Amino acid sequence: MVMLAYRDALKQALADAMREDEDIFVVGEEVGRYGGAYGVTKGLLEEFGPERLLDTPISEPAIVGTAVGAAMAGMRPVAELMYVDFIGLAMDQLCNQAAKIRYMFGGQIGVPMVLRAQGGTGRSAGAQHSQSLEAYVMHTPGLRLAMPATVHDAYHLLRQALRQPDPVVFIEHKSLYAMREDVDLSEPPPDWGKAVLRRQGRDLVIVSYSRQVHYALEAADQLSKQGVEATVIDLRTLNPLDFETVRAEVEKTGKAMVVTEGPMTAGVSAELAARISEECFDFLENPVVRVAGEDVPISVSVELEKASIPGPALVAETALRLVA
């Protein structure tokens, strides 16, 4: 076991993978000399050199396009975008090319790349640097999507992402980088695409991912003091989506909540709630409840930013209404 911060677990995963596979390289703005916008690649340049830590101009299409081409040619690139908010600049390279190459070439060519980015609120970064855009990725067939909530998963999911035959978008929450946990780097990794139960309860199920998992767990602790026991499911990946675990737990309690930081309208919470309603209908005692971000641009104001996304108090309050 080793104590690691979330950002250091990501760096360890990159370093371990790069030592094992010479085809892996990192490309992005300031990933080399500066060490990454959030310090994830800090120190890797000294070990692996500038040919495998490629600093680029400020051009997301160039970064992702380089990664797509290199992956098609047999390399395994890791492209880093400073903020997931800028993913729109590379939507053609990512969604029209990387996501569809295997299909367009009849399976003869794949795009085994990882696109790392960070998203979410918590640093007063304003409307253009604080979004949760995972629904954009989840909506695109051909793209895998991982969103680790823990230090353990930051390491193991990134290691697994770097073994996938298809493009993986790997979104890290900016408020988790300093979180620290003990991690066993040698243990067998969790199954790719498999959700995990972070807490088991009898009264309702809370489905979430990324930082909202921690808020759901805080809410579950509050609920427990009032005699309500909640199961908390951490999805880990949104594509592949482990709906079998969700279904099994919802069937036990008959009550389900979905908690996400992204906006409510047409977001991941809508998709998950719809699937639970459709596939668990005969077991539901109440309609599925969504707790999600407000449909507003994120403010630079600390208080307004905090009020625009769910927190533990809102999750707990909503859960009490669901089980009443």
Image (cartoon, grey):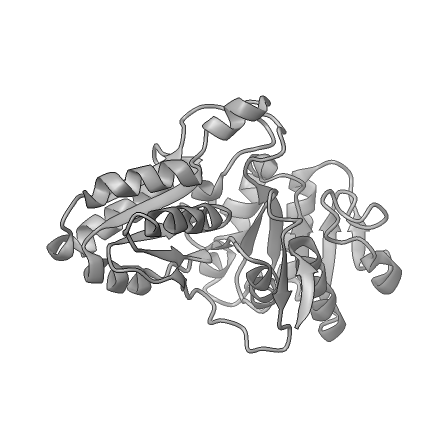
Residue 20 vertical position relative to residue 270 in the rendered view, above or below:
below
Residue 225 in picture, x, y percent from top left: 34, 50
Q: Residue at x 52, y 62 (%)?
A: 166
Tell me if 260 is positioned left or right of 324 in this view: right
- Examine the rendered structure and indicate whether residue 121 appears above or below residue 214: above
| Residue plotted at (45% across, 33% down) | 309
Which x, y percent locates residue 85? 57, 35
Task: Please say if 225 is above or below 82.
Answer: below
Whether residue 89 appears in this view of the structure is no
Give the residue at x 84% y 57%. Answer: 45
Report the residue at 44% width, 48% height from top: 218
In terms of depth relative to the viewer, which is nearer, 23 or 310?
310
Q: Quadrant of residue 142?
A: bottom left
Say if 57 sits above or below 207 in the image.
above
Q: Is residue 40 left or right of residue 121?
A: right
Left or right, 257 with respect to 8, comes to left
The outermost residue toward the left is 282
> 133 or 236, which lies in front?
236
Nearest the viewer among 110 and 215 is 215
Q: Position of residue 82 (x, y in %)?
A: 67, 41
**Which quadrant of the figure contains the N terminus?**
bottom right
Q: Quadrant of the C terminus?
A: top left
